[in-house]
Structure formats: structure tokens, C-alpha cells
Image (cartoon, grey):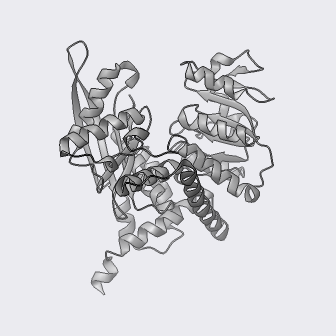
């Protein structure tokens, strides 16, 4: 493993949390490494009759607290290191939220935008064929992630059902509603973050109206914009992979939604309604109260962290801030609501979907929202209390909170002290 690997960066958080707890060395040894990572090549028939192969992975990082849970992403730059790191984060995310899961993750190294819809379906089904012995409703439960969606999850669940000879909707979450999906899943990641900010607003010293910048305007970015704008806050800047727009007076969010729905960049709205074009790389430094990284990993790093003017960062993306940038933000008194807490609404509602599939009884959207809000507020308050009690950042507090639960489960199997005493 290279010194600069993504997993090495993630393990820094583990060491920081461990320094605040009296836990057995066995716990750290178990959590330093993935339990299993499987690599395969998926071979599919392309529309032109040729055959093409794609690298794919599935990682089950730790299953001490229950079956592993985590999304499948289709991305041309996916690697085994990325998959294992994401599975590590999922392990801690599920523990933070006290869900009965361990962490998992999967990926296919592909740009899905280069595939036809038929090729995309064949690739999705090939993934399940390759990993059918690894996944299962009591062993490993996938979900959508970057460039995958409910349609793809539906194909995957159907392929699994054909292979085992019966419907098993609980094997995959994030499915279409008609195929056993849960109401409230579409905006769950953003909604969980929204509930968290609103619950801690007074503690965080936030005013009635915030100026918000959103880095990444995909699913989570669009939903958080809608929720915050609907709550009276002003969206002043947004970016996507092709550009960014800014307006000191506040962007017209409906115009941004229309542009994305039409397949255009947010930058296409520049020159309309007071929208000004700006380099996407400059969004981190926009003058705002709340900065929301909702794109990919390492978007805020040692070269741009000092430019952050926001007083609060809400991590809707996984790992958007490097450890070096974290230290700079902390030094500048910028509070970060970390990914393993802030974006955990997605896996929490996925848990609700799994429960509903297993019991065959489905809740209303209002019930889903109420249950999600309750868990986000409960665990958000617990992490805030750890942060204040130990005088640590919210990220370290979240890892301490999660590590305490993981340690309890690991130590329950017996440690060196038990076997040598």
C-alpha cells in the first residue's frame, strides 16, 4: 500500500479516535484491514457484437455488528483502495448511527455514460452474477452510489432473485418503489444532513438565514439545495463537473434544477437571473456561512483549505476533506460535520427499506421522515456531547462515538487479556 493511499488517510481518523478511548489493541488490529475484498473481471456483450471486460470489486470490511452494507459505484477511476476506504467509512457510519450493520462497498471501473441502456443492464446483471456468493440479505447488502440508481438496483435485485429462485427484495436497497423500495430514499442523504444542521443550529451559532455554497450538484447537492432554500436560506454558489455559478443575491434554484434536468451544467445558467460564471475550483473559497461538499473525495485539500470562509462545513460527500485540510480548518475555527454522521441519512433509510422488505410491511413517507429525524438528532446530539466533553473536533467525536460501539462488539468475542488471564 502506498504511503499516500486513501485508506491510509482514513486510518488516521481511527488512530485519532483510539487515543481518546481505553480499548484493547485487538480492536485496532481488526479494524486496520478489510475482512475480504474480491476482484473480478465482468465480461459483457456490447451492442456491436464485441465483448468487453470491466474491472469490478466488492469489499466486506467488517461484519462484527451485522451484515455488511454499502453502495456500488460505476466510475472510470474506481480502484481497490477506494473501495476498501469507502467500506471502512461505512463501517464507522453504521456504528455512528447504531445500525445493525458492518461496512461494505463495491465498484465497477467504467464510465456508464459511454454505455447504451442495454449494455448498462447487462453490466449490472453481470456484477450480481459475479458476486452472488458474497452478497445476501443476511451477509452483504448493496445499494446505489455514484452513477448508479434505483433502476440499476432493480436490475440487480431481479438478477439475484433469478439466481436463487425466489424474490429476495432485502438483498439490495435503493430499489424502485414498485419493486420494494422505500419512500423517502431519494433525498435521504441530504435530508439527514438538513435535519442535523437544523437540530444543532443553536449550538453552532447559526443565524436564521444562512448563505450556502454547494460543491457538487448531483442527487445530494440538488436535494440539499431544495431543502435549505425551502427553509429560507440563500444558495449563493453551486458547482458541478463542468463549472460553477455564483450570485451574491442568491441563485434561482429552480433555474438550476431545470438546467440539470435538461442535461446541462449549472454553468449554462450564467448570464440569467443574476447568475455569474466562476471556476468550479474556486467554490471552496466562496464567502458563505455553510459550505456543502457533495461531490467526490478529497475536494478540500491542503492547497485550498485556507481559502474556506464558511463557519460550518456539512460533508454530504464521502471523504471530501483530507486530514491535512482538516487540521487547517480546525485551526481556523471552521466546524466540520463529518461524512460518517452528516451523510448517514442514506444508509439509515436503506436500513428502513431492508427492515420493511423483511417484514413485508411498509411505512408512509411521513413515518420515514420522522424516524430519520429522530435518529439523526439522537446521534448528532451524542456526537456533539462527545466533542464538547473531550474538546475534540466533531469528526474525531464521531469516530470516538462509533469506535466505542465497535470496540464493545469486538471485545465481546474475547481479547488477549481474556485468554491469558
Q: Is residue 332 left or right of residue 263?
A: right
Looking at the image, residue 277 lies above or below residue 132: above
Looking at the image, residue 352 lies above or below residue 23: above
Q: Is residue 296 left or right of residue 50?
A: right
- Residue 203 spot, x, y in % from top left: 74, 59
Residue sitting at x 71%, y 43%: 290
Q: Can residue 51 be seen here?
A: yes
Closer to the camera in the image, 373 or 235: 373
Residue sitting at x 45%, y 54%: 352
- Residue 315 spot, x, y in % from top left: 58, 45
Closer to the camera in the image, 302 or 392: 392
- Residue 147 spot, x, y in % from top left: 43, 31
- Residue 44 spot, x, y in % from top left: 22, 25
Residue 5 lies in what quarter of the image? top left
Residue 188 lies in what quarter of the image? top right
Residue sitting at x 22%, y 46%: 166
Outermost residue on the top side: it is: 48
Q: Can residue 321 be seen here?
A: no
- Total residue callouts: 0
Closer to the camera in the image, 226 or 217: 226
Residue sitting at x 56%, y 18%: 262
Question: Where, quadrant-wise, is the C terminus in this rendering?
Answer: bottom left
Looking at the image, residue 98 lies above or below residue 135: below
Amino acid at each position: 500500500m502506498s504511503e499516500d493511499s486513501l485508506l491510509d488517510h482514513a486510518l488516521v481518523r481511527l488512530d485519532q479516535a483510539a487515543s481518546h478511548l481505553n480499548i484493547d489493541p485487538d480492536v485496532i488490529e481488526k479494524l486496520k484491514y478489510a475482512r475480504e475484498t474480491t476482484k473480478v473481471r465482468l465480461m459483457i456483450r456490447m451492442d456491436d457484437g464485441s465483448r468487453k471486460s470491466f474491472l469490478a470489486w466488492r469489499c466486506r470490511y467488517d461484519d462484527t455488528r451485522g451484515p455488511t452494507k454499502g453502495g456500488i459505484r460505476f466510475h472510470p477511476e474506481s480502484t481497490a483502495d477506494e473501495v476498501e476506504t469507502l467500506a471502512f467509512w461505512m463501517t464507522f457510519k453504521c456504528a455512528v448511527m447504531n445500525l445493525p450493520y458492518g461496512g461494505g462497498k463495491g465498484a465497477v471501473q467504467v464510465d456508464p455514460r459511454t454505455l447504451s441502456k442495454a449494455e448498462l443492464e447487462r453490466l449490472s446483471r453481470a456484477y450480481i452474477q459475479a458476486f452472488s456468493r458474497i452478497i445476501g440479505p443476511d451477509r452483504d447488502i448493496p445499494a446505489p452510489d455514484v452513477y448508479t440508481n434505483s433502476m440499476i438496483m432493480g436490475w440487480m435485485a431481479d438478477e439475484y432473485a433469478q439466481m436463487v429462485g425466489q424474490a429476495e427484495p432485502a438483498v439490495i436497497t435503493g430499489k424502485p418503489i414498485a419493486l420494494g423500495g422505500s419512500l423517502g430514499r431519494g433525498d435521504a442523504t441530504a435530508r439527514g444532513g438538513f435535519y442535523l444542521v437544523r437540530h444543532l443550529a443553536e449550538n453552532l451559532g447559526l443565524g436564521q438565514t444562512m448563505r450556502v455554497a454547494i460543491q457538487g450538484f448531483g442527487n445530494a447537492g440538488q436535494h440539499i439545495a431544495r431543502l435549505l432554500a425551502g427553509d429560507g436560506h440563500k444558495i449563493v454558489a453551486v458547482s458541478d463537473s463542468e463549472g460553477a455559478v455564483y450570485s451574491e443575491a442568491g441563485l434561482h434554484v429552480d433555474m438550476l434544477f431545470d438546467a440539470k434536468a435538461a442535461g446541462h451544467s449549472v454553468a449554462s445558467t450564467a448570464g440569467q437571473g443574476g447568475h455569474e460564471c466562476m471556476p468550479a475550483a474556486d467554490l471552496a473559497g466562496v464567502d458563505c456561512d455553510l459550505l456543502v461538499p457533495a461531490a467526490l473525495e478529497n475536494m478540500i485539500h491542503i492547497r485550498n483549505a485556507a481559502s474556506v470562509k464558511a463557519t460550518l462545513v456539512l460533508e454530504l460527500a464521502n471523504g471530501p476533506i483530507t486530514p491535512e485540510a482538516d487540521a487547517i480548518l480546525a485551526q481556523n475555527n471552521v466546524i466540520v460535520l463529518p461524512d460518517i454522521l452528516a451523510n448517514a441519512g442514506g444508509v439509515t433509510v436503506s436500513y428502513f427499506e431492508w427492515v420493511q422488505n423483511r417484514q413485508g410491511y411498509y411505512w408512509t413517507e411521513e413515518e420515514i421522515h420522522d424516524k430519520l429525524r429522530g435518529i439523526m438528532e439522537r446521534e448528532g446530539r451524542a456526537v456533539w456531547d462527545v466533542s464538547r466533553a473531550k474538546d475534540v473536533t466533531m469528526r474525531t467525536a464521531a469516530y470516538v462515538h462509533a469506535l466505542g460501539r465497535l470496540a464493545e462488539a469486538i471485545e465481546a468475542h474475547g481479547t488477549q487479556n481474556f485468554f491469558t488471564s
